[in-house]
Amino acid sequence: MDVVVVGAGVTGLTAARALTDLGHRVTVFDKGRRVGGRLSTRVFANGGRADAGAQFFTARSNEFACAASEWEAKGLVHEWCRGFSSNDGHPRYAVRGGMGQLATALAGGLDVTCSVHVEQIRVGADGVIVTWPEAHGHGAGRVDADAVIVTVPVPQASVLLGSNVLVPPISYLPTLSLMVALDRSVEISSSGGLQLVEDPVLSFVGDNHAKGTSVSSVITFHSTSDFAASRLDDPISSISDRLLRAARPYLKRASVLETQLQRWRYATPVEVFPKRTFSTEDGRILLAGDAFGGPKIEGAFLSGMAAADQINRGA
């Protein structure tokens, strides 16, 4: 079968890899400049690196635990810690050099084209038609496929599909990520991470040096969803200044060398669809992602595997 995957995050890359291994012809498109989605790593002027999106992942299901073990054996991931305030026995996996490195590895050997902003997906007489306009150095184009897996956030998928498909009404909570490069190391905690439950501004603090992402001190601060919702469209300088004030107690006497901000409008699905995929009646168009498999890296992976299996069984 000829399959198009829209979105090169964890779900899309997982589905594309599984289908390719099964002998299907798979093409992946992503509107970003690089693969990964929330497996995103930023680089700083001093050579420091910071994970902007997912900071780590856990593996609670046997299926994902097997994948995590394979990645660990290959040196793609390593165990960061087993909890931040206490040891709960569940490894938190991180990636040396940043989570983006894992995305790059997952995309290896796949037919992936970035900077293509898919505009429309519709069912034609003999399959599914995917089109995009001219932009970012790519000419306007069209691909005809037997099936399409759409892995972008559901509100964006709804726009792509238009009135052709009535998608589930799933909404998301936003997050703001401020990454701060410092002139010296600071101790965040014994592990290098903190999950905050009562702070009105910050929800997570992660030391990228402590978890092996960066050779120098760069701290990632994630906002609460309430704070992000109230500031999401404010100017970058305004958001950064407010988050930096909230982060100051964790920076101690270190001087700030550089900051970078990432807005995540669709960070966490509010509701999770009861199945790992959603498909049209004819099975030609599938929606997959963390809104279906669960709001974490593991859920995104499981949804991708389920989408590939569904396409393969219908071949």
Image: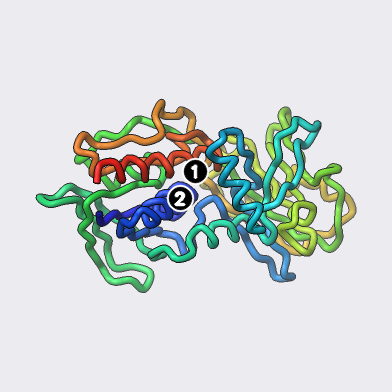
- The residue most toward the right is 253
Residue, x 46% and y 28% (percent of image)? 271
- The residue most toward the left is 125
Q: Can you give x and y, in whole percent of width and height, for residue 59 in the image?
A: 61, 38
Residue 238 visible:
yes
For the residues labelled 1 and 2, say whether their Cβ atoms are less than 8 Å apart: yes
* Mark nearer the N terminus (1 vs 2): 2
Q: Can you give x and y, in whole percent of width and height, for residue 244 in the image?
A: 73, 49
Q: Nearer the viewer, residue 14 or 56?
A: 14
Residue, x 31% and y 56% (percent of image)? 24
Above or below, 8 relative to 150: below
Residue type pointed to by label 2:
Thr
Q: Nearer the viewer, residue 242 or 12?
A: 12
Residue, x 48% and y 61% (percent of image)? 107
* Distance CA(mark 1)–CA(mark 2): 6 Å
Q: Can you give x and y, in whole percent of width and height, for residue 295 in the image?
A: 52, 35
The disc placed on residue 301 is 1
Q: Label 2: which residue?
A: 14
Under circle 2, the secondary element is helix
Q: Is residue 278 left or right of residue 249?
A: left
Label 2: how many residues lie within 10 Å, few (<14), some (14-19) or many (20+)?
many
